[in-house]
Image (spheres, grey):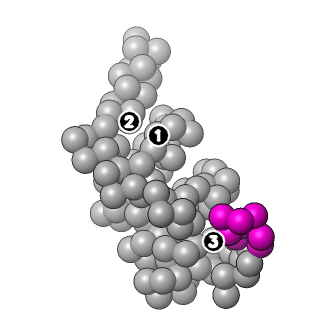
């Protein structure tokens, strides 16, 4: 029975709304920390890197709104999320910094200070700050 329950949970976590949002995305957006923690147990890389119609993934939406506790949870689960990009090529760091979310910026840089340097389309590296 427990295998069946785990399968059902995993399939529910993978469900995507018509807006391209998963339950994890919505929980991160609404700052439901306990729900985020629980959903992370049943999520895979695809679940939290998938993008909504806004072209944001779970970390992007949390960073864009300054939800530092959610950002920390997601990065503790998978630090490589720092490197994800939106359709417009913005990292969560760029998204958080343009919206003035200093605590989130610090958390992202703590997890991956290489984010200070991004590649331009011509292959050259530039510092974003």
Mark 2 element type: helix
- In the figure, 32 relative to 107: above or below? above
Q: CA distance from mark 1 to mark 2?
A: 7 Å
Q: Position of residue 43 (x, y in %)?
A: 49, 37
Q: Is residue 53 left or right of residue 56?
A: left
Q: Over which residues does the magenta segment extend?
A: 118-125
Residue drawn at point x = 30 percent, y = 63 percent? 30
Mark 1 element type: helix
Sequence-first tag of 1 and 3 = 1
Other residues around mark 3 within 10 Å, as few (<14) / some (14–19) / many (≥20)? many
Is 120 part of what is drawn in magenta? yes
Q: Is residue 81 left or right of residue 122?
A: left
Choose top left, top right, bottom left or bottom right for residue 44: top right
Q: Are marks 1 and 2 in contact (CB under 8 Å)?
A: yes
Q: Nearer the viewer, mark 1 or mark 2?
A: 1
Residue drawn at point x = 39 percent, y = 55 percent? 55
Q: Position of residue 36 (x, y in %)?
A: 42, 52
Q: Main secondary structure of the magenta part?
A: loop
Q: Determine which of the numbered discs, if any, sits on residue 92 in the image.
A: none
Q: Determine which of the numbered discs, if any, sits on residue 47 in the image.
A: 1
Residue topped by disc 2: 13
Looking at the image, which is closer to me, 55 or 111?
55
Q: Position of residue 4 (x, y in %)?
A: 40, 14
Residue topped by disc 3: 108
Is 123 part of what is drawn in magenta? yes
Q: Does residue 57 appear anywhere in the picture?
A: yes
Mark 3 element type: helix
Other residues around mark 2 within 10 Å, as few (<14) / some (14–19) / many (≥20)? many
């Amino acid at each position: 029975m427990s295998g069946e329950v785990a399968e059902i949970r995993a399939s529910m976590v993978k469900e995507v709304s018509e807006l391209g949002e998963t339950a994890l995305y919505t929980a991160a957006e609404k700052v439901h920390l306990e729900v985020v923690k629980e959903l992370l147990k049943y999520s895979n890389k695809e679940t939290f890197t998938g993008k909504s119609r806004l072209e944001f993934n779970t970390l992007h939406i949390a960073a864009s709104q300054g939800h530092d506790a959610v950002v920390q949870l997601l990065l503790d689960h998978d630090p490589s999320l720092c490197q994800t990009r939106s359709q417009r090529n913005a990292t969560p760091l760029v998204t958080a910094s343009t919206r003035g979310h200093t605590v989130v910026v610090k958390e992202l840089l703590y997890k991956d200070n290489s984010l200070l340097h991004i590649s331009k389309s011509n292959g050259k590296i530039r510092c974003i700050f």
